Amino acid sequence: MLTTALILLPVAGALVVAAFPLPRTATAGLAFLVALMEVGLWIVAASRFDFDDGGLQLGTSREWVESLGISYSVGFYGFSLWLTGATVVVSAAAIGYALWIGRDRPRAYYALMLLLTGAVVATFAAQDLLLFYVSFEAMLIPLYVLVGVWGGARRMAATLTFVVYTMAGSLLMLAAVVAFGVTQGTFSLVDSGTSDNVWIFLGFAIAFAIKAPLFPFHGWLPLSYREAPVEVSAVLSGIVSKTAIYGFLRIAIPKFPEPADDLAVLVLVLAGAGLVYGSLLAFRAADLRGIVAYSSMAQMGLITLGIFAFDDLGLDGAVLQSVAHALVSASMFLLVGMVERRCGTGELDALGGMARGRPVLATVLLTTGIIALAVPGSATFAGEFLIMAGVYDQGWGYAAIVALGIVLAAMYVLRLISAALHVRPGSAVRDEALDLRPGELALVLPMILVLLVLSAWPALVSQSSFPGDRAARAVAKNYAASGGRAFIGSDLIFVIHPAVGARPAGPHP
């Protein structure tokens, strides 16, 4: 019931916010209260979750359409619970930011933000393919409206581009969902077996690549991230993109082990290209939002490298990096919004010198930037190191690309910090511009504190995302009920049989 409550609480809150004509501040405050309640409910769920248990937990399953094998089936694995935790924290911060600046048309705005939160949580909890598809697509409706109505000057172009890309991915996924469910005789992710159909795998993989986005399916990213309200960009970059990671971990790899292994080199090459290309674009971006947006694209490429390393280190690092990036990216976008409100622009040429007289802003931005550039001892460094060590078994060249990505990340993050805080004050920086207010600090400080905790204890996520700290084996066990199956890793093929569990079948040829 806890999982269902996590899904329904923001949806019910959205309905209440939309239905009752409360004053603007009361509407925003109610939405923020619901978001904080969602965080509290997640903490209760995490306290009841046994991270040593390999099975699905906190689950609920009810037959929906028995003749088609469709059910309402939800629950959490360790990695999806951590992604849900990042979701509720980032959503609360985004809604709090909207409350702080006072968004207009509050009933519609906050209802859409809460609906978006509920859809993302449902995506991470879904254990039925049709339920996954419905929730995966349901989050797009609030995003279309949030960008198209509350976005910047080019919001209509951004919305149109976003719609075209995501609808293409939606149609591909719908075809893949139907084909897989019909051939398996069920849409249950728990009871279904595996498939060796490359085309169905590609339908899922391309849909996830568009949502992330991954190179070369990132065409919607520049306009959408720049024109969306800054807190919506924080949600897009921080948590919506992670639904693609969940899709790879829960569907694409465990349900299609042979196609995933056959196309692994292609995916690794594209992910590596996206990491380098996104980092270069971030370094060349002329504005703060562009740097954070393209860095998100680069980080998604890095996380994908970890997933398709097909081993424990890479998968653990991918989950840790996903959680850390969600918090870093959301914090950076909100800080960018705070700078833009003080200066009226995010163009680097018009900024500079903001550290003078604004010690809190300088400290918070510098701390977040240090974590973002993955200095040793940070949570992001731990995630990137795990990914680099994991992907090395697929070829030393991939590890070299990860190392290059770390260097490029330092370059674009230091450029952002220098352009905003140091050099000579730009034309848009006014002496009377205030330091961060306590309300603004209260929005980003919790995320930074969580990042500092993960920096001191990265194993909190990396060693609890998969049962027994055996990520590759755990992913394989997701389809153990289907009989003897093999999950192809970088070193071993794990053969799964319901009667004997996982056992190594010998070296990968």
Image (spheres, rainbow, N blue to C red):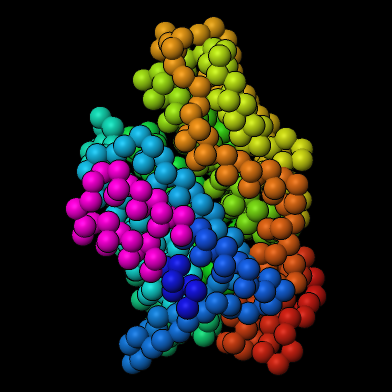
Q: Main secondary structure of the magenta part?
A: helix
Asked whether residue 39 appears in the rendered view, the answer is: yes
Picture residue at 78% right of the left edge, 77% below the top: 504
Quadrant including the C terminus = bottom right
Picture residue at 66% right of the left edge, 37% below the top: 371
Q: Is residue 440 above or below residue 272?
A: above
User: Which region of the structure is painted magenta?
Assistant: 8-37
Which quadrant of the figure has residue 55? bottom right
Give the x, y percent position of residue 259: 55, 68
Q: Is residue 236 above or below residue 506?
A: above
Q: Is residue 485 above or below residue 361?
A: below
Using residue 177 as the reference point, say whether residue 194 is left or right of it.
right
Using residue 462 as the reference point, say whether residue 115 is left or right of it.
left
Using residue 436 as the reference point, say whether residue 11 is left or right of it.
left
Give the x, y percent position of residue 7: 41, 68
* Number of disc labels: 0
Which quadrant of the figure has residue 309? bottom right
Asked whether residue 299 appears in the rendered view, the answer is: no
Using residue 457 as the reference point, say whether residue 40 is left or right of it.
left
Picture residue at 45% right of the left edge, 80% below the top: 73
Which quadrant of the figure has residue 178? bottom left
The reply to whether the magenta stretch includes residue 455 is no
Picture residue at 58% right of the left edge, 77% below the top: 57
